Image: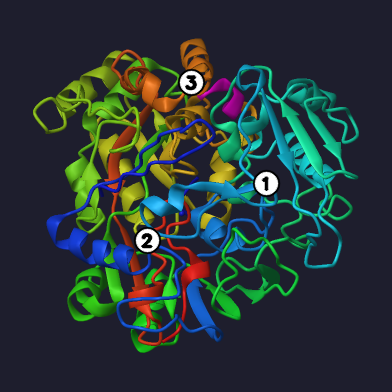
Amino acid sequence: MRKYRGPVAAIVAVAAALALAACGGSSNSSSSSASGAASASSSTSSSSATGGAPKSGGTIKIGTVGPDSYDPQEYQTVQADSALHLVWTGLLAFKDGTGQASTELIPGLAESVPQPTDGGKTYVFQIRPNLHYSDGEPVKPSDVVNMVKRNLFLGGPFSSFYDDIVGATAYTAAKKQTAPLPGMIADDASGKLTIKLVQPDTRVLYAFAIGEAGVGPASKAIFKNTTGNPFPGDGPYTLKVVNPSPTNGEFILTKNPKFDVPTVAKGYLDQIDGMVSTNVNTMTENVINGTYDYMTEDPVGDLLPQVESQYKDRFLIGPGYPNTYYFFLNNTIAPFNKLAARQAVNYAIDPTALQRIFGGRLHPTCNLLPPGMVGYTAISPCPWRPNGTPQLSKAQALVKSAGLTGAPVTVWTNTKDPRPAIGAYLASVLNQIGFKATIKSLNQTVYFSTIGDPKSKAQIGFDDWFQDFPHAGDFMGNLLTTAAAKSIPSFNSGFVSDPHIDQQVNALDAQQPPAVASQWAALDAYVNSPTHAYLVPYGNEEDTAFYSTRMNVTQCSGYPNLVHRVDWALLCLK
């Protein structure tokens, strides 16, 4: 998942004890404050060291750059997921909590997390009886089939998660809503749903738990993007889009009285108002003065040290959920269809310069997989910076030898701070090594869908990935496979297509991650070796959470949540 969205280990029990881990880095000063938040709100328990149950009720305002889409199958960003996973519940879900607990896979609409049969190729779900959507329609197994078909038909960014369902490839090729999908068998009378796969895939249960697998009534979840008129959900909150503007928009989440999934938190707050803008500094000031109660963004510039020093009791920074920041390189068009051009960018980038842009919250990396994830092994020494410093002269020589001196290159970025500065840095580096770079900046709400469309012909630019679930396949499968490149928009912004990557992802996804950790590490080294240089990873970011004085941060921070960043269902007032 994109972020529009330190060392925390996550062990997830899935079916036959599937063990996974997830973490990111943190500084010594920040890890203590974050760990305090985690211990204070690590579950939905109603007791705390301060005594008494968390307060229920009330309304808060949240400052955010907003969802990139209000359609559960179309959104790509953390900001969208934080809000919208409360509106639509899937077959499965992740436990409401913080730290390690937040990666536990639990039943959602289904009564239990099924164990696979048929060598890992068949799953049978039983839908809970008497569940209803917010409009009163009953929840049916066929609605889940409709959700998957909708994903495949629309070719949305998460559609490749369902490619291993029997008949999925043929369904997509048919381009017909009513075409058969024989791998999904729904019996609405009994509530039984059977899913058959062409091969074992350990990611599939996670694919039915992420927010983008949210289910709506088939009668209203029509086969077109419904961001302008979202269909009813079955989650703890309902959604009203007051104003869809990405610069001064607003959406409202209100408690859903029909919600009745016992494993998923109902939420403490009666109402959450999302106040959408692109001005992170104004958001920060609004939290400082109490106009807003929380912000989904990280304070930037001079406000970051001010907030960190003056508001320690309501500002948390440190271990967040696994992420990697990188520059995408479009492997299909000039100049980055040439290996020498891709190598040159990798040799020239200085992660320490980017670390300064992030206010010190970025930890330099040479890997695509983030630290702590099963399969992560630090690539050391980094082939691009064996002594820790960029090699500009080597980059310049590569550009010249490839006949690319003066070649025009457009750097793509978006308007959310500090991304304009990241784009400016990249353009400066490209100019230093011989290209002629200009910058194209878009609003964040349309940015990722634009660079993920091959028709845009985006050459190079800002990108990032925050885990959807703790599995190396979430990074490798989404960002580098041929199947992912065929989705529109695609998460594979570089449109990488390499048979070795495809084969390895398919083979490794079929096994439990700990059993093939070394092979995931080898694939990580492969994708950004000088032999391939498919993209330019440069850092892993620390997360922050900033609250107003009205908020009960001790009991109800909801931070760090390793799937949603902050779990809004756990937020409460003093």
502 lies above or below 110: above
| Label 3 – label 1 distance at C-alpha | 22 Å
Secondary structure at numbered mark 3: loop
Mark seen at residue 417: 2
- Badge 3 crowding class, 10 Å Cα cut-off, few under 14, some 14 to 19, many 20 or more, is some
What type of secondary structure mainly makes up the magenta span?
helix
The picture places residue 305, in percent across and down from the top left corner, at: 19, 70
Name the residue: 35% across, 86% down: 549
Mark seen at residue 91: 1
The picture places residue 433, in percent across and down from the top left corner, at: 25, 30
Mark seen at residue 182: none
| Label 2 – label 3 distance at C-alpha | 39 Å
Name the mark nearer the viewer: 2 or 1: 1
Name the mark nearer the viewer: 2 or 3: 3
- Badge 1 crowding class, 10 Å Cα cut-off, few under 14, some 14 to 19, many 20 or more, is many
* Mark found first going from the N terminus, 3 or 1: 1
Three-letter amino acid code at the position of disc 3? Gln
Name the residue: 66% across, 75% down: 255
Instruction: Identify the image quadrant of residue 52.
Output: bottom left
* Mark found first going from the N terminus, 2 or 1: 1
The picture places residue 509, in percent across and down from the top left corner, at: 51, 23
| Image position of 230 (left or right of 269) | right
Q: Looking at the rendering, in which quadrant would you find the C terminus?
A: bottom left
Three-letter amino acid code at the position of disc 1? Leu
Name the residue: 59% across, 20% down: 200
Secondary structure at numbered mark 1: loop
The picture places residue 557, in percent across and down from the top left corner, at: 38, 71
Residue range highlighted in magenta:
481-485
Residue pushed farthest left? Answer: 387
- Asked if residue 166 shows in the view, the reply is yes
Which residue position holds label 3?
Answer: 511
Three-letter amino acid code at the position of disc 2? Asp
